[in-house]
Image (tube, helix red, strand yellow):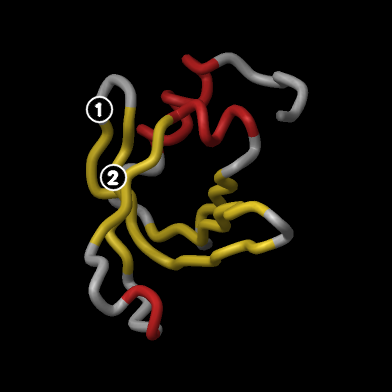
Amino acid sequence: MRKKTQSIEVIKAKIHAMLGKDINMSVCRGRKRVSKYAGTIENTFPSVFIVRLKSKEKDTEHIPCLSYSYNDVLCGEVRIDEVS
């Protein structure tokens, strides 16, 4: 687990500001495995947010969307970058 650098409320506000925008996301799966996705933040809820995937790769063709908690972002398991 990484050192806490931001509060959960700041992370919620940043993700809510990215609602409907294109993002690139990398997810740490453990044991040096990292999955990278392209998508759009579709919806935000009090404890989780939903990402609609755009990439049509083999490992994501049956998964239309993913959900993550804000704590995943806080701990560094999920990293989100806005596409500009």
Q: Residue 50 in the image: x percent, y percent?
A: 28, 45
Identity of the amino acid at label 1?
A: Phe
Q: Residue 13 in the image: x percent, y percent?
A: 43, 24
Q: Which mark is residue 5?
A: none
Identity of the amino acid at label 2?
A: Ile
The answer to the question of whether label 2 and label 1 lie on touching residues, with beta carbons closer than 8 A, is yes
Residues at marks 2 and 1, CA–CA distance in whole angstroms: 8 Å
Q: Which residue is labeled 2 in the image?
A: 50
The residue lying at 33 percent from left, 57 percent from top is 40
Image-based side of 1 in relation to 50, left or right:
right
Quadrant the N terminus occupies: top right
- How dense is the environment of label 1, judged by Cα within 10 Å: few (below 14), some, or many (20 and up)? few
Residue 59 position by quadrant: bottom left
Q: Is residue 38 above or below residue 67?
A: below
Q: Which residue is labeled 1 in the image?
A: 45
Which is nearer the N-term, disc 2 or disc 1?
Answer: 1
The residue lying at 64 percent from left, 52 percent from top is 30
Say what secondary structure mark 2 lies in.
Answer: strand
Say what secondary structure mark 1 lies in.
Answer: loop
Q: Nearer the viewer, residue 15 or 55?
A: 55
Q: Nearer the viewer, residue 16 or 59?
A: 59
Q: Residue 27 in the image: x percent, y percent?
A: 55, 54
Residue furthest to the front in view is: 31
Image-based side of 51 in relation to 4, left or right:
left
Q: Nearer the viewer, residue 18 or 61?
A: 61
Residue 22 position by quadrant: bottom left
